[in-house]
Amino acid sequence: MAKQSKERSLSEHMAAKKTVRYIVLIFLTILCLFSFYILIINSTRAHYDIQKGFSMLPGTSFIKNFKSLMGNSNLPVIRGMINSIIVSGGTCILSTYFSALTAYAIHAYDFKGRKLIFSFILAIMMIPTQVTALGFISFMRKLNLLDNFIPLIIPAIAAPNVFFFMKQYMESSLPLEIVEASRIDGAAEFKTFNSIIIPIMKPAIAVQAIFTFVSAWNNYFTPNLLLSKREMKTLPILIAQLRSADFLKFDVGQIYMMIFFSIVPVIIVYIALSKNIIGGIAVGAVKG
């Protein structure tokens, strides 16, 4: 009886701890999603309604705000959306592929200076973008690449953060015996990488694709320095332009609508790749 009572007490204790965990997780989830909920609510409210204060209930001005945004001749929203998709998509593809390729080279090959190269790449992570921005802009001006998407996409090949994640994931999930077996079978290195390594790396690639896409999508600093032509601007620049408008023409509802409009592609990308994100982070962080 004493043993059964002890087991019952232990079971109740574990159930209570589990309940507390779920309550905390639900609370944190609500806290994280609350700002998105307010964004969606305010995108349905008129300017004067938002000025009155906070509301948990949606308004009736969603269509009006949308038409006002699309009818704004100073804000080429659709063009800005296309520009952001081009930049973010190109950055995402190049960053994940070449970072995985670099991580594979460091992981699978034993060559002189490998540790030094690895340390050098990690050291680059410590350099903020703002430090090199002035030199980068001057270099792009000499190359006549201002108002061009190339400086926003091609440098994404060098992504130390993505490389580091890929390297840690390979150490946890990619045994070198697979690579050696492929070489014995006579497969070329690029064929081995594209046909064998990439499928194994799919969870890690999906995780970094999400993070890289979101980072490039929200990037305001570098595009604002490089892009000045109206038809080349990305959505973050247009949002900042809308917010800096004359106070008398300042439409808060239109701003919320534009922010809501800008996060839709991010949500779509996340939903498309999210099934791999938990497993990818869990495995990739084992040795991180």
Image: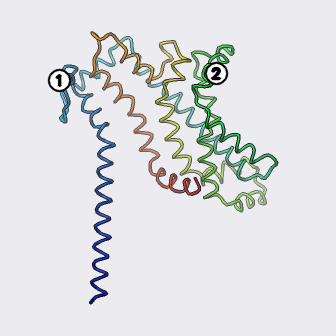
On screen, 258 above or below 279?
A: above
**Residue lying at 36% horizontally and 18% vertically, measured from the top left:** 243
Q: Which mark is residue 136?
A: 2
**Residue lying at 63% horizontally and 39% vertically, measured from the top left:** 160
Left or right of 111 in this view: 130: left
Left or right of 45 in this view: 152: right
Expressed as whole percent of the image width and height from the top left, the position of residue 203 reads 53, 51
Expressed as whole percent of the image width and height from the top left, the position of residue 35 reads 31, 37
Left or right of 49 in this view: 2: right
Q: Circle 2: is it few (<14), some (14-19), or many (20+) Cα within 10 Å?
A: some
Q: Circle 1: is it few (<14), some (14-19), or many (20+) Cα within 10 Å?
A: few
Q: Which mark is residue 162?
A: none
The type of residue carrying mark 2 is: Phe
Return the residue at label 1: 52
**Residue lying at 48% horizontally and 26% vertically, measured from the top left:** 84
Q: Number of numbered discs present?
A: 2
The type of residue carrying mark 1 is: Lys
Expressed as whole percent of the image width and height from the top left, the position of residue 153 reads 59, 28
22, 46: nearer the viewer:
22
Give the SS element for disc 2: helix
Tell me the quarter of the picture where residue 157 sits.
top right
